Image (spheres, coloured by chain):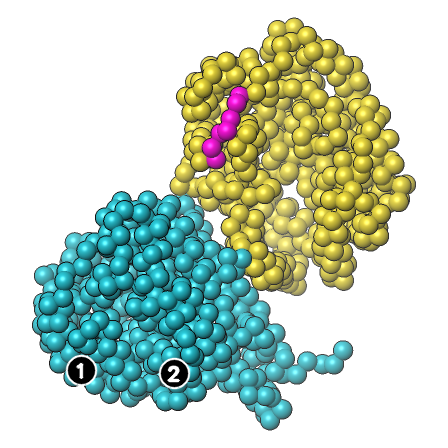
Chain colours: A cyan, B yellow
Amino acid sequence: MTHPSAYDRLRQRFERMATIHEASAMLGWDASAMMPAGGGQARGDQLAVLASLAHGLLIEPQVSDDLQEAEQGKPQLDVWQATNLKLMRQAHIRAVALPPDLVEAQARANSACEKIWRQARQTSDFALVRPALQEVVKLVREQAQALGEALSLAPHDALMDGFQPGIYSADVTPVFNAYKTYLKEALPRAEALQARRPAPVMPQGPFPTALQETLCRSLSQRAGLEADHSRLDRSTHPFCGGIPTDVRITTRYDEANFAKSLLGVMHETGHALYERGLPTAYARQPVGYAAGMAAHESQSLIIEMQACRSNAYLGWLGQELHSTFKGDAAPYQASNLGRLWRRIERGFIRVDADEMTYPAHVIMRFELEQALISGDLQVADLPAAWNEALHALLGITPPDDAHGVLQDIHWYDGLFGYFPSYTLGAMAAAQLMAAARRQVSGLDAALGQGDFGPLLGWLRTNVHEKGSLLGFNDLMRQATGQPLDAAYFEAHLDARYLADKMA
Amino acid sequence: MTHPSAYDRLRQRFERMATIHEASAMLGWDASAMMPAGGGQARGDQLAVLASLAHGLLIEPQVSDDLQEAEQGKPQLDVWQATNLKLMRQAHIRAVALPPDLVEAQARANSACEKIWRQARQTSDFALVRPALQEVVKLVREQAQALGEALSLAPHDALMDGFQPGIYSADVTPVFNAYKTYLKEALPRAEALQARRPAPVMPQGPFPTALQETLCRSLSQRAGLEADHSRLDRSTHPFCGGIPTDVRITTRYDEANFAKSLLGVMHETGHALYERGLPTAYARQPVGYAAGMAAHESQSLIIEMQACRSNAYLGWLGQELHSTFKGDAAPYQASNLGRLWRRIERGFIRVDADEMTYPAHVIMRFELEQALISGDLQVADLPAAWNEALHALLGITPPDDAHGVLQDIHWYDGLFGYFPSYTLGAMAAAQLMAAARRQVSGLDAALGQGDFGPLLGWLRTNVHEKGSLLGFNDLMRQATGQPLDAAYFEAHLDARYLADKMA
């Protein structure tokens, strides 16, 4: 037996760490989808111990030595291995960048703040959570500073890098500014056009939960998610969890409205298909994981927004729905489903927003959190700044903070730098769909038969199987011929919301 | 902050190990009750990594030093702590007793043999699995030898000690021999009496799965298992898993016969109630765990066999069943349920056996595995020895090896020393029930109202809350005034199967 190389030692170490993270992922799913309340305290301990074991493996002194030795032998590595090594180095830098005291203080502050936030949101009382949020922001600023120094990035960029590596303010700001200009002009036009169309008809329920569940499972599997590598369960907050060979998606059911669970499940199915398509040769290695949160969101949105809401698919889906739920056929006409599920509306709540106004919610959060991290904005001034920003973009003002600054968990849980991923994902989805349509003939014809095969095949080759080999921009460039360009998203919105005939 | 004592360091280490084992327990439950087949390979890796992390914590050199130091400071420990320390020492001896090569060879051999056994059982082909079983037995002999030396026990006793600490062949053999004598005389009498009674009437189904599930959940909760600390799900092989604050029990449903799931769930509920009642002050410490597998089995059987099949409970249960399933009331009469669920029959299959013949199945396995471990019996001669032993005890001969030596997974998975626990548990259950009836007035009257409160209260105080503070014999002595005595089990059988009027 030959002595393993430094790279091999690292590979084995990261595999072990990844296997621990897999255990945590399954336990996290269980906590949301299965666990009785009484198991919560022990579960917290289990997750903390697993996290500390994985972290311990990453900060052992041996890792530094192995990284250095492997980097010296880099010429012998192929491009996958070399990228893997680069990502291992990044992970190590992140792991050792933060003083343990700060990590612990953040864990405590985030958890405390998040608990108070739940109460504050319920009573729409920002003052209640303000001191806790001030503490969170204070610590996040320290975290951003330390990470930035370690990674040679500006503080807020260092936070963004943790979610979508390699994409920073300098990439995002021009794209977002261009979209603000687009929206100012497009939104009123879209609203005017929508007002001239017939009002959509709501299908009349009740839609029994069991029937919805069977339908969701069948549609998800029909889109390509294999039954023997996935589960669909229920949880208060729908998500896609688990691991690539055993993906766990969840949803919640409303017997008055099947669309929420159906479109939600297709969204999570997009995430799940990405996980299923990751390169198995690099499973449990940094290069084998998804390419970041914006990339991940592009895969959920290309299924939910691009494919499922396409005219072609709606035609097929309407018939499925009618044969499932029976009753009057009219609400299940593709044209009506389109009017129902592609409805523009200026609203206060991000998660309820349509695809045209959604980016406005993201952009204002992005700008506000940059100001919070830089210190240009103080927590005490946040609610007013929030309301001003929303008014500037959408011309509306929240009736209270529950419908404003208190609506999202992210900041109250110490999560800064995440928001851009949602909109970058939406834009990437439009660009990828356009490329897929150019390169794959019959893609929409297949969707018109409920067949995701051609689309999925293209995504497998051009996105999923790449893992983290390419940065987000290179991934887009190789798949579509261009780096991320908001023009595709705007063209998609134009066609869907501004064309005289329904796109 | 004072420097933690050696005992405190050990306490923290064992807590960490226990927390890892908790994660494994939840993942093990998931593998049986939830996981899609495609997740199996990754799950195996996750469990292996967690096991190796926990094992690693136990064999670190520091543990030896801490144990020695703590043992020198033992006078300062109270009886719980001192027992805890003693159990830590035992765990450490076991962990370091086996050469890593042997542990690995056993893991491989057991897993390979178990796979072949599934095939061999299906085709009733012992020759197919013989070589694999020979390898398993060869390695188990080595394991028993090494453990025996480390623990100063005879080889087979060292294996038994792993399941029910402190109970060895010298304890079990006289009890089992006495039972053989009892059975020879009692079984024909019970059969004759049974033949003179009316034949039981089977309730006519179908009994919808959903209805059975609701019923099982309700009966289990009514017996004291709290909904916010437990789940009931389905699996091919019913079991009780999870952790004390989050117990997961499973069952399977047969729409033609609700009794299997109902009595199975009550059996698992007994296990679950034990876990729920363990001393929380010593959670995650060796002294805080259940007192062994025989003790555990006594708790499942006192619920399933002693309480649920008592005349008092059957009276109440029959009415519940009839109001759940409707239809003809006659099959739900207590007397009919008694004749149905307390039916003696000489059979080939252990898991289907009634409570009078069940010990015969255990006793023959106990004797055969002792001979296998000592080398007095070779694997090639096992099928013939099996058939002879069964014939000697029950006067019947299996039609093939699938109904004989191939029926149980235990040996093919490397599990030797476990079988006695089933019958020790049954005997302990009878003895505990007799003591509870003596000490708690109105116990049967409460069962007649479906109320397990008085019984459970007594078990909590006298068994559950003791954790592993006492050895099995001392536990029995403190709870019942005597060490384990088969006379209580025989008296129970006499009353139930040999009394002229139904007991």
SS at mark 1?
Answer: helix
Specify the label residue A285 is tagged with.
none
Secondary structure of residue under mark 2: helix
Closer to the chain start, of discs 2 and 1, is: 1
Q: Which residue is mark 1?
A: A182
Q: Quadrant of the N terminus of chain A?
A: bottom right
A353 relative to A1, above or below: above
Q: Are marks 2 and 1 on the same chain?
A: yes
Chief SS of the magenta region: loop
Name the residue type under label 2. Arg
Mark 2 neighbour density, 10 Å: few (under 14) some (14–19) many (20 or more): few
Depth check: B236 or A52 in front?
B236
x and y percentages locating residue B35 in the rendered image: 53, 53
Residue at 83% in and 35% down: B386
* Contact between labelled residues 1 and 2, with CB atoms less than 8 Å apart: no
Question: The C terminus of chain A appears in which quarter of the rendering?
Answer: bottom left
Q: Is residue A165 visible?
A: no
Q: Which residue is mark 2?
A: A438
In-image side of A133 versus B203 (left or right): left
x, y percentage for residue B71?
64, 50
